[in-house]
Amino acid sequence: MKKKQPPVQEVKRPVDQYFENLNVNFQNPTNRIFQIIFLPLFFFGLMGLIWMIPFPQFDFLVKLGWHTFLNWGSFFIAMLIYYYLKLSPTLSYAVLLCIGIMSYFIVQLEYIERDGGPSVLLVSGVITAVSLAALWWGKSKENKAISLGEFWTLISVGPIWLWHFVFRKVKLKY
């Protein structure tokens, strides 16, 4: 007689574990709306702040014409996309598309600043601070107390988490 084998437990990918944890910890409908609005704004503001950190002008970069494209934001984007790529390649492409759009608007803010408008640092700083405050306030709406570590997970994995809802809605595998 054959022995019954225990059911094989499905091994979850790290990205699925992150999403499951975020889904459990962030369930309040008001907070979800805040996350949909303010998480992308937070990343836009943070990207703008990092983008504007002065980058050294190396002669070889100027000779190659790369000095206009290479800044600290480039390194931030590369590290972020690499991290997301390791978690879920498909979702990382969606975030990369969003980063491209955000980069366009940051450059537009640079043009506005050049023409006498407000500083990109000021605009990005205000957007980052307001977004972070709104996300923190939204966190307080949850029934269960959210730790700082869980909030940090929301901040770091949040963009692909938001995209995973879109992918699930249109039935795309991620």
Image: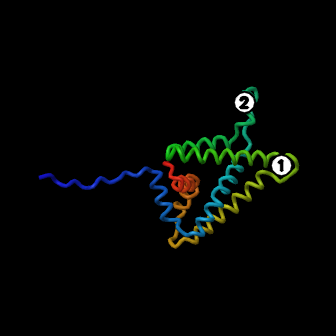
Q: Determine whether 130 is above or below 75 in the image.
A: below
Q: CA distance from mark 2 to mark 1?
A: 24 Å
Q: Which residue is mark 1?
A: 113
- x, y (%) of residue 149? 52, 60
Look at discs 2 and 1 and give the one toward the viewer: 1
Pointer 2: residues within 10 angstroms few (<14), some, or many (20+)? some
- The picture quadrant where one finds residue 132 is bottom right
User: Residue 13: x and y, percent?
Assistant: 43, 50
| Rendering coords of residue 77 (x, y %) | 63, 44
Q: In the shown orientation, is residue 9 left or right of residue 106?
A: left
Residue for badge 2: 61
| Helix, strand or loop at mark 1 | helix
Seen from the viewer's position, the closer of residues 68 and 147 is 68
In the image, residue 105 sits, relative to residue 29, either above or below, namely above
* Left or right for 7, reference 112: left
Say which amino acid is labelled 1.
Glu
Residue 130, by quadrant, is bottom right
**Badge 2 vs badge 1, beta-carbon distance below 8 Å:** no
Residue 107: x %, y % from top left? 76, 45
**Nearest to the observer: residue 91 or residue 61:** 91
Vertical comparison of 69 with 167: above or below: above
Mark before the other along the chain sequence, 2 or 1: 2
Residue at (78, 51) in percent of width and height: 120
Q: Check disc 2 and report its element: helix, strand or loop.
A: helix
